Amino acid sequence: MTRVAGKPLVAFGTALFGALGIASAQDNPDAKFLTDAVRGDVAEVKLGELAQQRGQSEGVREFGEMLVDDHSNALKKTAELAKDLNVIPPAQPSQEQMQTHDAMARLSGAEFDQEFVAQMVKGHREEIAKYEKQAASGESKVAKLAEDLLPTLKEHLAMAERLQSGAQSHDRSHN
């Protein structure tokens, strides 16, 4: 069996994508952002579904429902823009995101709630920083999308922080 070295194959793939007008995430910051955003939305939908199934508190289950709704809507917008810009949106979360989901799926009760909320606080803080950076990057459609989605991410963070501090509801009116 002949083995092909990885680098020339990657270079060939990058050249092929370029020739086809398909943006490569490694060469294009907008394409990378869109790819990461799609992965993040898919992961959040899956975690939201898990929270609805495994959450002990009503607040965690309601928050999970909100994550599914909001990130499903964001996923539609992000994937649509990716396709418009000839970026192939991924169908699955990253390996790290899948490992987080699998670890969360092994938890139950108060332990699940505590870890889930901690993950949501940490993850949304990281995502907000990425979206703010992208929103400030210029006048592109991708920057506008990031700017449009930031309020929802900030709302999620605020709710996760309220849950972490012991509040049981994610009432949107506390913003």
Image (spheres, rainbow, N blue to C red):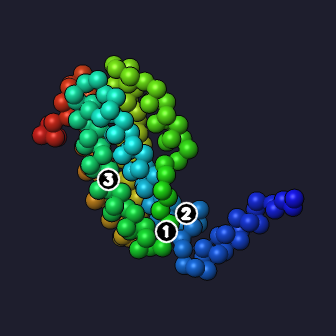
**Residue of label 2:** 25
From this viewpoint, is residue 164 visible? no
Secondary structure type for disc 2: loop
Residue 76 visible, this orientation: yes
Residue at (46% x, 36% y) in the render: 101
| For residue 71, side relative to residue 92 (left or right) | left
Check contact, mark 2 vs mark 3: CB within 8 A.
no
Residue where numbered disc 1 is placed: 87
Which amino acid lies under the numbered mark 2 shown in the image of this protein? Ala
| Residue designated by label 3 | 72
The residue under label 1 is which amino acid type? Val
Give the CA distance from mark 3 to mark 1: 19 Å
Please report whichever mark, 2 or 3, sits nearer to the chain's N-terminal start: 2
Residue 62 in the image: state x and y as whole percent: 23, 35
Q: Nearer the viewer, residue 136 or 50?
A: 50
- Determine which quarter of the picture holds residue 46: top left
Contact, mark 1 vs mark 2 (Cβ under 8 Å): yes
C-alpha gap between disc 2 and disc 3: 22 Å
N-term-proximal mark, 3 vs 1: 3
Callout 3 amino acid? Ser
Residue 82 as seen in the image, left or right of residue 7: left
**Which marked residue is nearer to the observer: mark 1 or mark 2?**
1
Label 1 vs 2, first from the N-terminus:
2
